[in-house]
Amino acid sequence: MLPPVALPASSARPWSEAMHDALYGADGFFLRHAPSEHFRTSVTASPVFAQAVRRLAELVDDALGHPDPFDVVDVGAGRGELLQALPDVPRRWRLTGVDLALGPPGLRWTAEVPPLEGLLIANEWLDDVPPEVLFDDRVVLVEPDGTEVLGGPATAGDLEWARRWWPQGRRVEVGASRDRAWAAAVGQVRAGLAVAVDYGHALGDRTAFFDRRPTLTGYRDGRQVPPLPDGSCDLTAHVALDAVAAASGGRVLTQRDALERLGVDPTPPPLSLARTDPRGYLALLQATSQAAELMDRRTLGSFGWVVCPVGIDDPFVG
């Protein structure tokens, strides 16, 4: 990628500011659009994902001794797709969506993560927390039409983050804001488990590749589009999952590993079942096909899970 031009124009702003307003401002993208209208997630791809989250919540509930209420809090809940898809929810489970736009009735809604005892899950939330973007240790500014220009020197804090977590490459998407946001969310868990699910990268992946192809991009109507900070599209950037985990005392699993430990099995049913129970065979085949997509490392299976137990043993161990 060519560097941004050297002289900033008066309307250019840091990516962190422009992205925040484009997504969450008074006329922001997420206040006007449901995420499911524009991109596909593990939640919308398959009910298998919600079933796995339901199993995880059950494990946390057991570890906590079945408190009443037991909280299931979805951060960046969209229109409540995940919470509504959870099967067989006990009455004492309290389902809460955290988002700026209100979702359907029947769920609790709040704009801030509440204190909770139970399971906190954030599926594809952190990628929409605006990062700062640097080029050669200077802040990258952006015009409303997407034109990038170079601003002044980066802050000491952003430079420190870049030196630790992104030491190679001239262009850096600084994830300090994601680290702080996730640490604050985990801090609201009195006891239980916090899980962030997102596409991202680790230290060994951050090479000069990202100079040529930054992860900051846009999505509209199911297609990838240029990242315009004008409220017309979703803006997203990959998450430095190892940095997020370090900020919250957690660890990183692949989605494939996490789902396997929650009992998701992509193995197709035996063909002999098609002769004795055709309907059962087709139902199982559909479920295992969906599971395979969720666990395929070339697609959704490449997602990472940042897992942070609070006051309980890690349910993914053993």
Image: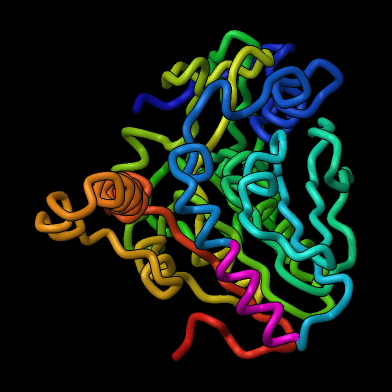
| Residue 301 in sight | no
| Residue 28 versus residue 241 in the image, above or below | above
State the residue lying farthest toward the front.
276
Residue at 36%, 38% (x, y): give it.
Answer: 211
| Residue 6 versus residue 107 in the image, above or below | above
Q: How is the image coloured?
A: rainbow
Of the pair 139 and 41, the residue shown nearer to us? 41
The magenta-colored residue range is 54-64
Looking at the rendered image, the quarter that the C terminus falls into is bottom left
Q: Position of residue 301 (x, y in %)?
A: 34, 54
Residue at 52%, 17% (x, y): give it.
Answer: 220
Is residue 36 found left or right of 268 in the rendered image?
right
Is residue 115 found left or right of 93 in the rendered image?
right
Of the pair 262 and 252, the residue shown nearer to us? 262
Q: Position of residue 196 (x, y in %)?
A: 59, 59
| Residue 217 in sight | yes
Looking at the rendered image, the quarter that the N terminus falls into is top left
State the residue lying farthest toward the top.
145
Which is the main secondary structure of the residues drawn in magenta?
helix
Q: Position of residue 310 (x, y in %)?
A: 72, 82
Residue at 42%, 54% (x, y): give it.
Answer: 303
Q: How many marks?
A: 0
| Residue 59 versus residue 211 in the image, above or below | below
Q: Position of residue 158 (x, y in %)?
A: 64, 53
Q: Quadrant of residue 255?
A: bottom left
| Residue 253 versus residue 128 in the image, above or below | below
Residue at 71%, 40% (x, y): give it.
Answer: 80
Magenta region includes residue 63: yes
Is residue 24 found left or right of 268 in the rendered image?
right
Q: Quadrant of residue 213?
A: top left
